[in-house]
Image: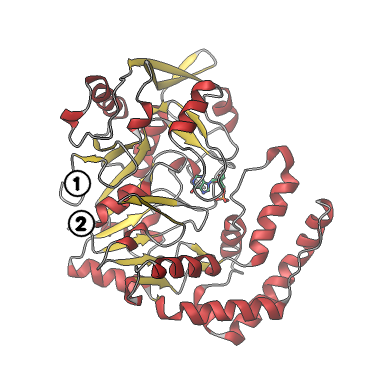
Amino acid sequence: MPNVVVIGAQWGDEGKGKVVDLLTEHAQVVVRFQGGNNAGHTLVVGGQKTVLHLIPSGILHAGKTCVIGNGVVIDPGVLLKEIDALRARGFLADAGQLLISAGAHVIFPWHKQLDLLREKARGGAAIGTTGRGIGPAYEHKVARVGIRVRDLLDAEKLRRRVREALAGVRDELTRLAKAAKVEDPDLDEGTIVGEYAAFGARLKEFVGDASVFLHEQVRKGSRVLFEGAQGTLLDVDHGTYPYVTSSNCVAGNAAVGSGLGPTAIDRVMGISKAYTTRVGGGPFPTELDNELGERLRKIGDEFGATTGRPRRCGWLDTVVLRYAARVNGLWGIALTKLDVLSGLEALRICTAYELDGQNITEFPLDLDDLSRVKPVYEELPGWGTKLSGARTLDDLPEAALRYVRRVEEISGVPVVCVSVGADRGETILMSNPFRG
Ligand code: IMP
């Protein structure tokens, strides 16, 4: 019974939500294992759009259990809004459909304030974070002063922890606010404790030991789908540091962030757009800072699902894809948004970088090197026809099929799924990771 991890093979926003939604049919359990509400997974089912930030996309399927693992950082206010919105539309009628790890860390108001004020202080070197408090929450987790979901369930413990945390952040916040010429953030212990204890009381019905549950499911032979957030190049270890998020987005973290051992994972599916996008700062070798980039942004609706920010757009980069294949151990690639490339006369795929007169094929981890590389392109013919009606590879125009084949040749990983539109049905699934 294979268990499958779905991860982003680029800088996030690859269309993971759609692929997870599609694969959920074949799984019994869907797990988020890292990140928080910096993610925004857009799903279109029957023409109706749903954006989820914390709850696994599998929640739209009846009879599946969705798990928020210990590796996620949770903003409980956002989570409760998501729960309420889903319930208002008839989903999540049974609380047993959602399990929240008691060990997941919680985002507090000071995390968001630190995130925003530190970004201001960075000025031109800002990372371009989503401002949701993700980095500071992970920082406190690692510094061993974080507050976990289980702490929300005990008002006295919560008060003690909030008091300690506030003592640790007040000075920095005051200093940052002064430098930014904004008011000192209003952080009242009693108000925060009251608000978060109320969040705890409402979330209690969903909180449990996710590791025990998952272990039991795997033992029983249930199929588990791990839903990654962000992407490989935003991973805190393997991404374009420091222009990264604060968690490990690569497949290896699926085990750590859920409380299962690595032997529970069988296959890793990497999601890649047929071109590339990036939100926020940092190097992006194939970026098209021109009319063509603008066109991709418009046709591909490349605006952040969480912040609404325009995404930077560029050609497909197979140096990135090969790197993602290496650090994630990819079994297959889902190539998304192929339809967005329709109507372009010629297409380009980056096959290598040129650095100081030499061609390199391995992704450079030195940020200065990466900022200086020039992409080496291969040109392929485009196609004029729309692709959204294609349901098998044979339905694709010859040039589109050639593009897909070339991507797998250069990346060395089979393309097992092609997405030709936003709707669940607009997908060609050649090989199902749960079956082989
Ligand atoms: P943070 O995760 O809010 O700290 O942001 C750090 C970097 O990751 C910024 O460049 C963000 O734009 C980027 N980022 C975070 N979450 C996502 C996502 O879900 N999709 C794309 N980029 C993201």
- Residue at 51%, 37% in the rendered image: 278
The reply, left or right, for residue 231 in relation to residue 166 is left
Amino acid type at image mark 1? Asn
Helix, strand or loop for disc 1: loop
Label 1 CA crowd tier, 10 Å (few <14, some 14–19, many 20+)? few
Residue 193 versus residue 233 in the image, above or below = below
- Residue at 72%, 53% in the rendered image: 117
Q: Which of marks 2 and 1 is nearer the N terminus?
A: 2
Q: Where is residue 307 in the image (x, y as percent from the top left)?
A: 56, 48
Report the residue marked by disc 2: 26
- Considering depth in this image, is 433 or 40 the residue closer to the camera? 40
The reply, left or right, for residue 392 in relation to residue 227 is left
- Residue at 55%, 22% in the rendered image: 290
Q: Position of residue 233 (x, y in %)?
A: 47, 40
Residue furthest front as drawn = 47
Task: In the rendered structure, find residue 432 and report the number of the disc placed on it.
Answer: 1
Q: Position of residue 272 (x, y in %)?
A: 37, 37
Q: Quadrant of the N terminus?
A: bottom left
Amino acid type at image mark 2? His
Label 2 CA crowd tier, 10 Å (few <14, some 14–19, many 20+)? some
> CA gap, disc 2 to disc 1?
9 Å
**From where the camera sits, is residue 331 visible?**
yes
Q: Which corner quadrant of the image does residue 204 belong to?
A: bottom left
Pointers 2 and 1 in contact (CB under 8 A)?
A: yes
Residue 123 versus residue 28 in the image, above or below = above
- Residue at 41%, 71% in the rendered image: 100
Residue furthest top as drawn = 357
Residue 101 versus residue 383 in the image, above or below = below
Q: Position of residue 275 (x, y in %)?
A: 41, 30
Q: Which corner quadrant of the image does residue 273 belong to?
A: top left
**From where the camera sits, is residue 151 visible?**
no
Residue 380 versus residue 55 in the image, above or below = above
